[in-house]
Image (cartoon, helix red, strand yellow):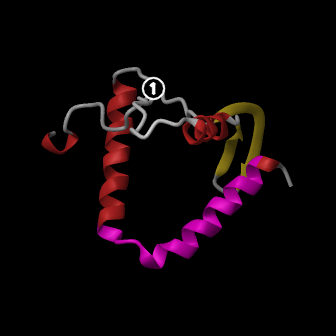
Amino acid sequence: MNEGLKILLFSISITCEILPYVNLNLFFSLEERQRAEKRNREAKGHKFTPRWFDLTDEVTPTPWGDLEVYQYNGKYTQHCAAVDSSECIEVPDIRPEFNPWQYDNLDAE
């Protein structure tokens, strides 16, 4: 089994385990805001790029269609190591390249 498929299956199993403990109204509200943000981002021609994963050339067939496979790039481990090794007591000011709420208030639309 390839690594991308293992990650996908692991994500699904974790989701199934925590789902009974999730406030579904908040979950679906967040999900809908994420979809609206994605539509807004695509309308503006902006492309989302994951920080911790890189796109591979591999494509995995599924019953729902082909899925692109992403591979963990190790940057999150480096980020955590850098934060853990710093002797700084203050929270580091690390600004992500992408802020999912960087667009206008989509509820007003």
**Left or right of residue 89: residue 23:** left
Quadrant assignment, res 11? bottom right
Q: Count the numbered circles shown.
A: 1
Question: Which one is nearer the viewer's eye here, 15 or 40?
Answer: 15
Q: Tell me which segment is drawn in magenta.
A: 4-25
In the image, residue 6 above or below residue 76: below
Can you say whether 38 is above or below 15 in the image? above
Q: What element carries label 1?
A: loop
Residue at 30% of width from left, 31% of height from top? 102
56 left or right, relative to 33? right
Magenta highlight on residue 70: no
The picture places residue 87, in percent across and down from the top left corner, at: 52, 37
For the point 68% across and 55% down, the residue is 8
Q: Is residue 14 magenta?
A: yes
Rendered location of residue 66, percent (x, y)? 69, 44
**Image quadrant where residue 21 sits:** bottom left
Q: Name the residue under label 1.
A: 97
Quarter of the image for the N terminus: give it.
Answer: bottom right
Relative to 101, residue 61 above or below = below
Q: Main secondary structure of the magenta part?
A: helix
Q: What residue type is labelled 1?
A: Glu
